[in-house]
Amino acid sequence: MHRTKVKVAEDALDANTTIAQANRADFDRADLAVVNLMSAPGAGKTTLLESVFRDGLGHIKPGVLEGDVQGSMDADRMASLHVPVTQLNTQNGFGGECHLDANMVRSALPSLPLEEIDLLVIENVGNLVCPAEFRVGEDARAMVCSITEGEEKPLKYPLMFRTCDLVLVNKVDLLPHLDFDMDKLLYNLEAVHPGVEHMVVSARTGEGVDGFRDWLTRVADRARTPA
Amino acid sequence: MHRTKVKVAEDALDANTTIAQANRADFDRADLAVVNLMSAPGAGKTTLLESVFRDGLGHIKPGVLEGDVQGSMDADRMASLHVPVTQLNTQNGFGGECHLDANMVRSALPSLPLEEIDLLVIENVGNLVCPAEFRVGEDARAMVCSITEGEEKPLKYPLMFRTCDLVLVNKVDLLPHLDFDMDKLLYNLEAVHPGVEHMVVSARTGEGVDGFRDWLTRVADRARTPA
């Protein structure tokens, strides 16, 4: 007798996982690496990407999916660097969604030239809570933490810091002008996510941006089939 | 024949409105003014409140409800100023809620000395999207916008800027060190919320904080029964 046991999806997060797996399969078919880039509003995600893409990513061809509640300002900035970009707005007529989920990303896939790029960077909606809860089919997660936000953010938004593979500590050009204790931030980061990789950068001056460029290249090379 | 027509609550926001009205009735019974204070993570809500409460609010006795995903660091800072404070954590075992809603605030009311205070400031979870969607029974809404977040935030998170009665443009002590155009921010603010009151402040140096203290006092005096 043939018996099959099917686990019923229990909630929205289970449904999200199912769709994230479908995205993942599509990304694999296109031999594409995907990075989910997250941060609070105004931490510098777009400026950092501009800084990285201005000089290119070597043999890796990047594309960007811009998640925003409304508008296409960030997508316009990417397009001016001649990086293929698709804008995904979460606005639904009221306040809009505060994060991207797997289904929203899935809805954008037909607009992306998946076969022509090697690395897709998904710039999530600026928010330190919900984006961390929704996998979208990514290979790796990076987050940008601006030093202007204070040292205690890892303790206040632990899931975000805990689920990231890389933490970019941004705006360090402002260090001389802030009451900011870098050791305290790194101590708090280590407390919520022991051993996580971090980089100290300034998207504005370009300090440390090479390290992020190398990291993106490594993620892309690791995720893709050797040529 | 007696006929009654009952409109069925259509969604979570309808339910929220019903509970917000119940909160409002309780606040009125306690002759209490309530301000919902919102911002992105690290914009300076707590530092601004510290700056305001350090010198007191004159004849107005304040209390604070601190909304955070996790931890009680902000509540500890308020308590050290001898302001009555209750911590409300939205952590539910996973990522936590990214905003306060009317029901969460309602659950905290029994812990607050409502009869002993004149003004309750609710410090919402750091997020520019969802907190704006949920009324909690407040008299007025204020938001803190840090100049380190860039000039375009009103265009990217319009509902937040549109539903506030006061916008506090914070961290202006950093103006000399940023590529920030104040006129552009104010132009964008006027575009999404024409005529909204704004104040330029630095919670760190105290610049402009008197204006916010006066605003809180006015809100409290207006909302409460004349003595």
Image (tube, coloured by chain):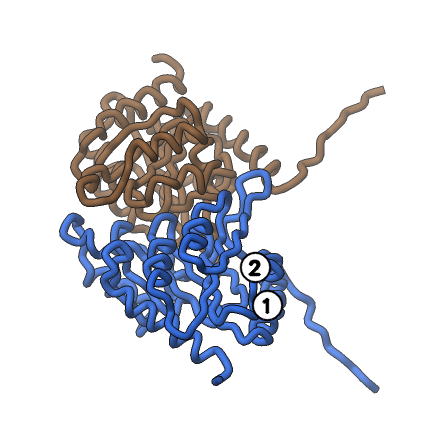
Chain colours: A blue, B brown
For the residues bearing labels 2 and 1, Cβ distance under 8 angstroms = yes
The residue under label 2 is which amino acid type? Answer: Val
Which circle marks residue B51 in the picture? Answer: none
Q: Position of residue A168 (x, y in %)?
A: 31, 63
Looking at the rendered structure, the secondary structure element under dot 1 is: helix
Q: Is residue B93 among the parts visible in the rendering? A: no
Which circle marks residue A105 in the picture? Answer: 2
**Residue at 35% from the left image edge and 22% from the top image edge:** B220
Q: CA distance from mark 2 to mark 1?
A: 8 Å
Residue B28 higher or lower than B52, as above or below: above
Q: Position of residue B19 (x, y in %)?
A: 55, 35
Q: Chain of mark 1?
A: A
Label 2 packing within 10 angstroms: few (<14), some (14-19), many (20+): many
Q: Is residue A147 among the parts visible in the rendering? A: yes
Q: Residue furthest right?
A: B1
Residue B51 found in image quarter = top left
Looking at the rendered structure, the secondary structure element under dot 2 is: helix
- In the image, taking residue B58 as reference, residue A224 lies left or right, namely right
The residue under label 1 is which amino acid type? Answer: Asn
